[in-house]
Image (cartoon, rainbow, N blue to C red):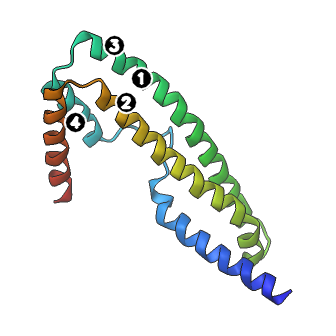
């Protein structure tokens, strides 16, 4: 029995560390697009000079991508709220930790799904670019990364 409890506590600690490392990165529908993101999108539009066909594909892809991401975000928010309500209940912390461990693991897995989905969406975006646009896009990404490191 002691070994089981110790195993659960160790597993819970591992999950807590993983979740806490990623908790501030949880996306929500309530947050407006950050100013930097808007600026980045505007910069892409200006410098890549999308054709009307590319713009139509981008618009269609954004709608599809948003729907896919919203499913994951809603599930993450639901789990986050469930975890929060468990900790706010009157049960002891160690019981709350045990009760929330599977939910925290699900949350971490959903975060990974969201990251994989973003990567897939970025790849789809890059597929519609011409060779010159791809070169310019790489330059823009490097500039943006350097700017945000400061």
Calculate the distance from the C-alpha at mark 4 to the C-alpha at mark 1: 20 Å
Q: Is residue 89 left or right of residue 118?
A: right
Q: Foreground: 119 or 86?
A: 119
Q: Foreground: 11 or 30?
A: 11
* Label 1 SS: helix
- Please provide percent x and percent y for residue 95: 78, 74
* Label 4 SS: helix
Q: Closer to us: mark 2 or mark 3?
A: 2
On screen, residue 112 above or below 122: below
- Please provide percent x and percent y for residue 119: 40, 42
Calculate the distance from the C-alpha at mark 1 to the C-alpha at mark 3: 9 Å
Residue at image position (29%, 39%) is: 37
Mark 4 lies on residue: 39
* Label 3 SS: helix
**Disc 4 or 3, which lies upstream in sequence?**
4
Q: Closer to us: mark 1 or mark 2?
A: 2
Q: Is residue 31 left or right of residue 108?
A: left
Q: Which mark, by number, is residue 126?
A: none
Q: Quadrant of residue 57?
A: top left
On screen, residue 111 above or below 75: below
Mark 2 lies on residue: 124
Residue at image position (16%, 60%) is: 150
């Amino acid at each position: 029995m002691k070994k089981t409890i110790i195993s659960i506590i160790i597993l819970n600690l591992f999950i807590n560390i993983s979740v806490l490392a990623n908790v501030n990165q949880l996306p929500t529908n309530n947050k407006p697009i950050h100013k930097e993101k808007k600026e980045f999108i505007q910069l892409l539009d200006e410098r890549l000079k999308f054709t009307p066909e590319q713009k139509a594909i981008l618009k269609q892809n954004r709608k599809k991508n948003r729907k896919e991401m919203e499913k994951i975000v809603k599930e993450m928010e639901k789990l986050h709220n469930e975890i929060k309500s468990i900790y706010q209940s009157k049960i002891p912390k160690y019981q709350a930790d045990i009760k929330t461990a599977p939910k925290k693991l699900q949350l971490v897995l959903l975060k990974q799904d969201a990251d994989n989905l973003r990567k897939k969406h970025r790849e789809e975006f890059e597929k519609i670019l011409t060779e010159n646009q791809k070169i310019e896009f790489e330059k823009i990404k490097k500039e943006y990364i350097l700017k945000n490191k400061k």
